[in-house]
């Protein structure tokens, strides 16, 4: 298993990035060099230096420390949104695929409706309706994300349901419960799990976007999207204020993406 | 199946989706934000005043009555009044959508022109340097926050080099071309207004490229994997085995079948670009639907937000319908199904 | 008393077609009667789409039969409730065509083989292990391969695993649905010989479904030939192969290679395509392709008649 992971350099890179993110989040107070929110007007708009690795913003806050603390916020958003939407989506998908008929029709029509909005637009309007806050952005993202899992799980359940090894189990006298949970679910979960690990990154990206337009984290929160939004005011004076938070988002999304792709190969039993 | 039959069936299938969308937007706008009456009257409202306004706005009616009224309004083009601009939302949408449409179309054209050739090159040079380079480029495109890329481009090409404009659709003080489509490049071209055309294109470049970055990543990856699976197929091997020259195999046989599946994903890419335009417009002060929506959010102008949501969903569905119809005409297998 | 007796079995499927979802009925199995004796093998041959696989699934009630009777050891199978069916499944098992699709890719061979015992709560953990290990050697795999996953085996090995799974419950009858069709010719005979050995040893009965006439000849005691959901000829294997009574059987047999090249044999080429089972021809279902067809064939549905003692065929001309 270990050898299989290390045989793909990109997966290793993804793993390393994700580990760095996790460590940063866990030890933020140790890693950060300054307070993430403390205003220091004397050293405002300073360029990156040994004192302020990533420079300071218009009120002298240390951007490096803000990014370090921001890791916690982003990670929490990613994990919670996936933790809410994944079970809802997969359970509905399993029900739709396994029971079929009317139930399937109803569930799939509902997912169609949710998926007929470009994701960020629906999340935007729900978050706007709920009012700007991080919690509401998480709710809004969870509400728009679950149909993807429903689709994935349903289609894999459908393809597995009609496979001969399920029929073999019916011929052996296995009851529907055993067939669903011992034969179908373990096989159907793999693609959704891979998607979930990719989504950790995409959720963070979407949440940063919503914060960027003023819906998510509110100042002075060191959320990356909100920091970028703020950096627009000082773009001319402080390129660093716009550069580093975006780099943090990019690396995070990239890390989860690479890890997800690696997981894809790993969860395929044909390569075990 | 006949082409008309196909389109008719798709149109029929759209009806329940549209109804579902209206129910969803209704649910978001009417049930979630608490009490609209309180929102309007503010914290100092008296209970009597609130009750009177609620009665007046029909908020005390059963939900289905309210939904009926909402639908009736939509059917007549009444999307409510923007509390910020004080104009009917529909007027605002009509006014801002050409800018978004122009931006999105520009991004889609760039996406196709860049993404598909990149995907093909990547697939035909699998694991070579060109492929590695393209794959990393595509991966970065997918993982990159578009609004951040926009800021960086703005920083470099506008603030640092000063070679490209950084905001708006035209240079300051320039009069827009005569209104035909509302898309400045098209209108300027049609009226032969060359200075405006030049300015409009220059203004499109940065936001357009920013918006295209994400979809280029998507389309490149899809084209690559689709081409790879075609190149592995038996008929391509046969063509090689017959001694057909590489270019002929690649462009004569593989291209058509490899690129076709990508077409079905254009609708999705378009939706992505539409969604992304909200953020990109905010970066470049591009006066389109996205900018309008962001302003509306900041001023708690709820009817405007819902109007944009509804409009974008409908556009998205129509684009998907067009893409599917297109695909139906291109793929001979579907006609005989 | 026969081990399995099927009388007038019908398996009709209703499918929706077209834009408005018009319903059509596909008569996959249309009035089949046959029986299998203890320890014997009945071969079922026919082109793909003739309903032979549906017949097997119908007998096991993997698809509910539309009409007819299935008697196993004299007991009516179609009337059984869930509990009785579960008991019955210990005695009647199936081996599938595709050894790649019939084994769960995520389970080890041990898990796959222990599943039947677990489902029926047979034996302790240790006893199950022992039973699996005993059987796995019988089918020619090693004990240490039990912890491998299906994809680590060849097609022939996988099919052995599929057979072992069917044998775990010590059934009396195995319905083998094209068990060797997906395998290389060289591997086919190994699997067939294994099946014959196991039959001897465990006194098994087989219903052996195949489109391959030479394979069926090799393994069967009796043969039934199916065409469009009906049995058109049934008898002992020697009788059918040496003296076919139905023109369809003759056409099929004429395509078989002959061991003696000096022996001249006319190959009968069938005209036209297999008609759709959702829209079968009138009268004799075979008349559209039959070289002997006359006007009456389009009108009369020929009954399955005893042409010579113990040899049945459904043709008015022989």
Image (cartoon, rainbow, N blue to C red):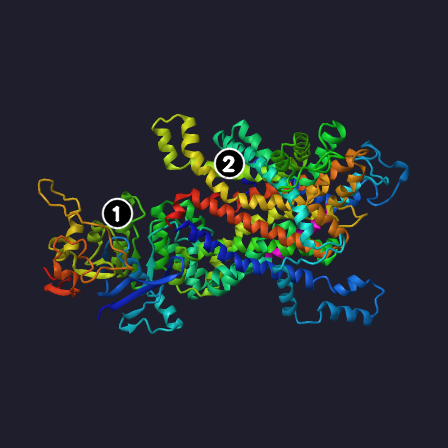
Respond whether the residues carrying marks 1 and 2 are from the same subunit: no
Q: Quadrant of residue B168?
A: top right
Whether A225 is drawn above or below C196: the answer is: above
Query: Does residue A114 appear left or right of residue A269 in this picture?
Result: right
Per the image, label 1 sits on a secondary structure element best described as helix
| Residue positioned most to the right | A42
Q: Name the foreground residue: A24 vs A161.
A: A161
Asked if residue A268 shows in the view, the reply is no
Would you name the residue on which mark 2 appears? B224
Whether C72 is drawn above or below A60: the answer is: below
Would you name the residue on which mark 1 appears? C189
Per the image, label 2 sits on a secondary structure element best described as helix
Label 1: chain?
Answer: C
Question: In this picture, which residue range is highlighted in magenta?
Answer: A71-86
Q: Position of residue C189 (x, y in %)?
A: 26, 47
Q: CA distance from mark 1 to mark 2?
A: 44 Å
Query: Does residue A23 appear left or right of residue C283 in this picture?
Result: right
Instruction: Give me the residue at 35% from left, 55% from top.
Output: C164
Q: Residues within 10 Å of mark 1 (few under 14, many from 20)?
A: some
Q: Position of residue B165 (x, y in %)?
A: 72, 32
From the image, give the main secondary structure of the stretch colored magenta: helix
Asked if residue B331 shows in the view, the reply is yes
Label 2: chain?
Answer: B
Q: Position of residue B334 (x, y in %)?
A: 40, 47
Instruction: Give me the residue at 68% from left, 71% from top.
Output: B61
Q: Residues within 10 Å of mark 2 (few under 14, many from 20)?
A: many
Does the magenta segment cover residue A81? yes
């Amino acid at each position: 298993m270990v050898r299989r992971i290390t045989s793909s350099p990109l997966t290793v890179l993804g793993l390393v990035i994700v580990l760095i993110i996790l460590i940063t989040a866990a030890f933020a107070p140790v890693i950060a060099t300054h307070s993430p929110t403390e205003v220091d007007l004397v050293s405002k708009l300073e360029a990156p230096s040994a004192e302020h690795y990533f420079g300071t913003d218009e009120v002298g806050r240390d951007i490096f420390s803000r990014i370090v603390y921001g890791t916690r916020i982003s990670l929490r958003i990613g994990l919670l949104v996936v933790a809410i939407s994944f079970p809802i989506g997969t359970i509905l998908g399993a029900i739709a695929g396994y029971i079929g008929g009317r139930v399937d029709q109803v569930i799939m029509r509902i997912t169609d409706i949710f998926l007929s909005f470009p994701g960020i637009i629906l999340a935007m309007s729900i978050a706007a309706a709920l009012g700007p806050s991080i919690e509401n952005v998480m709710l809004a993202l969870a509400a728009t994300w679950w149909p993807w899992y429903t689709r994935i799980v349903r289609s894999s359940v459908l393809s597995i349901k009609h496979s001969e090894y399920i029929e073999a189990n019916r011929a052996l006298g296995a009851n529907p419960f055993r067939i669903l949970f011992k034969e179908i679910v373990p096989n159907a979960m793999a693609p959704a799990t891979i998607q979930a690990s990719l989504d950790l990154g995409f959720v963070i990206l979407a949440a940063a976007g919503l914060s960027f337009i003023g819906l998510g984290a509110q100042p002075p929160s060191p959320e990356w999207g909100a920091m970028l939004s703020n950096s627009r005011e000082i773009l001319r004076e402080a390129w660093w204020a716009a550069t580093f938070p975006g780099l943090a988002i990019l690396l995070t999304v990239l890390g989860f993406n690479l890890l997800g792709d690696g997981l894809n190969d790993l969860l395929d039993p044909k390569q075990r | 199946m006949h082409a008309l039959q196909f389109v008719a069936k798709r149109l029929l299938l759209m009806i329940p989706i549209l109804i579902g969308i209206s129910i969803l937007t209704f649910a978001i706008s009417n049930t979630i934000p608490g009490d609209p009456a309180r929102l309007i009257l503010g914290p100092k409202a008296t209970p009597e005043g609130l009750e009177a306004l609620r009665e007046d706005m029909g908020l005390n009616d059963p939900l289905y009555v309210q939904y009926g009224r909402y639908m009736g309004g939509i059917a007549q083009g009444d999307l409510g009044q923007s509390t910020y601009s004080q104009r009917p939302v529909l007027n605002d949408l009509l006014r801002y959508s050409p800018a978004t449409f122009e931006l999105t179309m520009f991004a889609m054209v760039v996406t196709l022109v860049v993404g598909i050739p990149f995907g093909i090159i990547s697939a035909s040079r699998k694991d070579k340097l060109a492929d590695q380079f393209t794959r990393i480029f595509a991966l970065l495109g997918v993982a990159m926050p578009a609004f951040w890329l926009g800021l960086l481009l703005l920083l470099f090409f506008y603030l640092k080099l000063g070679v490209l404009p950084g905001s708006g659709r035209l240079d300051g003080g320039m009069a827009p071309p005569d209104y035909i489509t509302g898309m400045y490049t098209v209108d300027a071209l049609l009226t032969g207004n060359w200075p405006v055309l030049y300015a409009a294109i220059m203004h499109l470049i940065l936001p357009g490229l920013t918006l295209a970055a994400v979809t280029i990543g998507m389309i490149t990856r899809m084209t690559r994997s689709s081409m790879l699976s075609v190149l592995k197929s038996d008929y391509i091997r046969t063509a090689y085995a017959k001694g057909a020259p590489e270019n002929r195999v690649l462009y004569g046989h593989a291209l058509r079948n490899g690129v076709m599946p990508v077409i079905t994903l254009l609708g999705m890419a378009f939706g992505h670009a539409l969604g992304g335009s909200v953020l990109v417009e905010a970066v470049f002060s591009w006066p389109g639907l996205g900018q309008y929506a962001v302003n509306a959010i900041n001023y708690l102008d709820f009817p405007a937000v819902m109007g944009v949501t509804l409009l974008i969903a409908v556009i998205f569905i129509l684009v998907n319908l067009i893409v599917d119809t297109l695909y139906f005409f291109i793929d001979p297998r579907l006609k005989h199904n | 008393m026969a081990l399995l007796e099927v009388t007038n079995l019908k398996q009709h499927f209703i499918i929706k077609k077209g834009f408005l979802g018009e319903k059509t009925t596909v008569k996959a199995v249309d009035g089949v009667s046959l029986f299998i004796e203890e320890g014997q093998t009945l071969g079922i041959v026919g082109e793909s789409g003739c309903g032979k696989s549906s017949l097997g699934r119908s007998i096991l009630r993997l698809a509910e039969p539309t009409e007819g009777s299935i008697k196993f050891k004299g007991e009516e199978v179609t009337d059984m409730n869930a509990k009785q069916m579960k008991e019955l499944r210990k005695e009647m098992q199936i081996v599938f065509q595709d050894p790649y699709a019939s084994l769960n890719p995520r389970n080890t061979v041990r898990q796959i083989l222990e599943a039947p015992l677990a489902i029926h709560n047979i034996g302790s953990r240790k006893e199950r292990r022992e039973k699996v290990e005993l059987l796995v050697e019988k089918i020619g795999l090693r004990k240490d391969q039990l912890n491998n996953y299906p994809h680590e085996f060849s097609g022939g090995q996988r099919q052995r695993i599929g057979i072992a799974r069917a044998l775990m419950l010590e059934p009396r009858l195995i319905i083998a649905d094209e068990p060797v069709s997906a395998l290389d010719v060289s591997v086919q005979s190994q699997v067939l010989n294994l099946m014959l050995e196991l039959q001897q040893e465990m006194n098994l009965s087989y219903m052996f479904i195949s489109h391959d006439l030479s394979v069926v000849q090799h393994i069967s005691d009796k043969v039934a030939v199916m065409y469009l959901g009906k049995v058109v000829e049934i008898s002992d294997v020697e009788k059918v192969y040496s003296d076919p009574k139905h023109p369809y059987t003759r056409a099929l047999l004429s395509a078989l290679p002959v061991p003696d090249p000096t022996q001249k044999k006319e190959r009968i080429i069938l005209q036209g395509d297999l008609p759709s089972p959702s829209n079968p021809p009138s009268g004799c279902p075979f008349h559209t392709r039959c070289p002997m067809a006359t006007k009456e064939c389009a009108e009369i549905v020929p009954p399955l008649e005893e042409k010579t003692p113990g040899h049945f065929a459904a043709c008015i001309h022989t």
